Amino acid sequence: MPRRWIAHLDMDAFYASVELLRYPELAGRAVVIGGGRRHQPQPGPDGALRFARLGGYAGRGVVTTATYAARDYGVHSGMGLMKAAALAPDAVLLPTDFERYRLHSRLFKAAVAEVAAVIEDRGIDEIYIDLTDVPGAQEAVGHDPHGGVRALAQEIRNNVRRATGLTCSMGVTPNKLLAKIASELDKPDGLTLLTEDDVPARIWPLPVRRIHGIGPKAGARLLGLGIRTIGEIAACERGWLVEHFGRRGGHWLHDAAHGRDDRPLQTHAEPAGMSRETTFERDLHAVHDRDELSRIFSALAAQVARDLQRRGYAARTIGIKLRFDDFRTVTRDLTLHQPASDAAAIRHAAGLCLKRVDLGRRLRLLGVRAGSLVRP
């Protein structure tokens, strides 16, 4: 029976790296992605581009991603831009350009598919790849018993670089759980190959949160029990873990800590829904800022409609998401008589949802969502 080889490929600082292709003069500098249109680079008197600085930023935006140079200052994805500005005021601030990122996403996935056909798409910048049955994967090369699969992984990385000009990191292991961890061990531009025998030395010393699936709450519970590393989970009796985390959670923790995972790749997963949302630069009021809110609301509905049409879906359910100035979040949904994918129908249904919400407070965020997707 052939040895199972599953790879996880993660593009390095993807959005930021795509922007550096466009602005190579920013290479090596602290760059943060997440600004708005007003942060678009502008030509100076000498023709050279002038870039916005993060220092002095005022608004509600968040960091989409950052270069590794910016991360050295403590800046990370999901952080508020005002907090990031305090950490790295001299960093360059660029607006997001999702159309460009989606283009490069398609390019890197096509480059991978030239070598290996069995792929699980995990988002715009990461995929799992089954290398088990790819020709050469089971071969030894010289004194390296895993040289064949190592060469395949490097071939994939080379293909991605040729197709996009970008680097990626890969973990190649017997399963998805270990591959996800391994792809982060030698970032950026790293290739890490692990077998079951490597788990004690390479995986057990890592903090528990490095296991994909252990979130903040489970991590805090483990810490409260005196467990900080994956190896300390592995040292626990299975029954003790079941006692503290329930039957399903306890068994999963025990298996995960020992690097056991038999999940297959999901190559044809259907999306649960599609949504678009925006956080406002300033809080908006339903009455005083009616025109601006209406314009944004219509634009979000149109974006959701384009997403549905591009991927060949219609929605049975339309919903909205609101976040008020007191950070309270409210959602409302409406089931349609007929599935819809056009902007007018989505806007109308979302408007009916909006009428079911008390809009007395100012708004921070507005979103439109399409759910219960079907193929028309």
Image: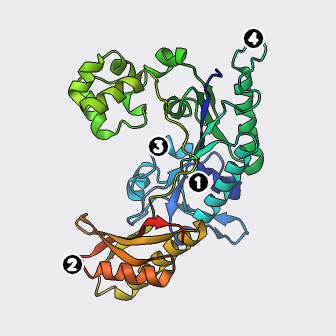
Q: Which mark is residue 358?
A: 2
Q: Which residue is mark 4?
A: 143
Element type where label 2 sits in the image: loop
Q: Disc 3 residue type? A: Tyr
Q: Which mark is residue 15?
A: 1
Q: Is residue 38 above or below residue 285?
A: above
| Mark pair 2, 4: CA separation | 70 Å
Residue 54 x %, y %: 48, 58
Task: Give the farthest residue toward the top.
Answer: 143
Residue closer to the observer: 1 or 115: 1
Element type where label 1 sits in the image: helix
| Mark pair 2, 3: CA separation | 41 Å
Q: Which residue is mark 3?
A: 73
Q: Residues within 10 Å of mark 1 (few under 14, many from 20)?
A: many
| Mark pair 4, 3: CA separation | 42 Å
| Mark pair 1, 3: CA separation | 18 Å
Q: Which mark is residue 145?
A: none
Q: Quadrant of the C terminus?
A: bottom right
Residue 232 x %, y %: 34, 18
Please say if the residues under marks 2 and 3 sit with CB atoms less than 8 Å apart.
Answer: no
Element type where label 4 sits in the image: loop
Q: Disc 2 residue type? A: Asp
Q: Earlier in the sequence, mark 1 or mark 4?
A: 1
* Residue drawn at (64%, 62%) of the image: 100
Q: Note whether residue 117 is visible.
A: yes
Residue closer to the observer: 240 or 228: 240
Element type where label 3 sits in the image: loop
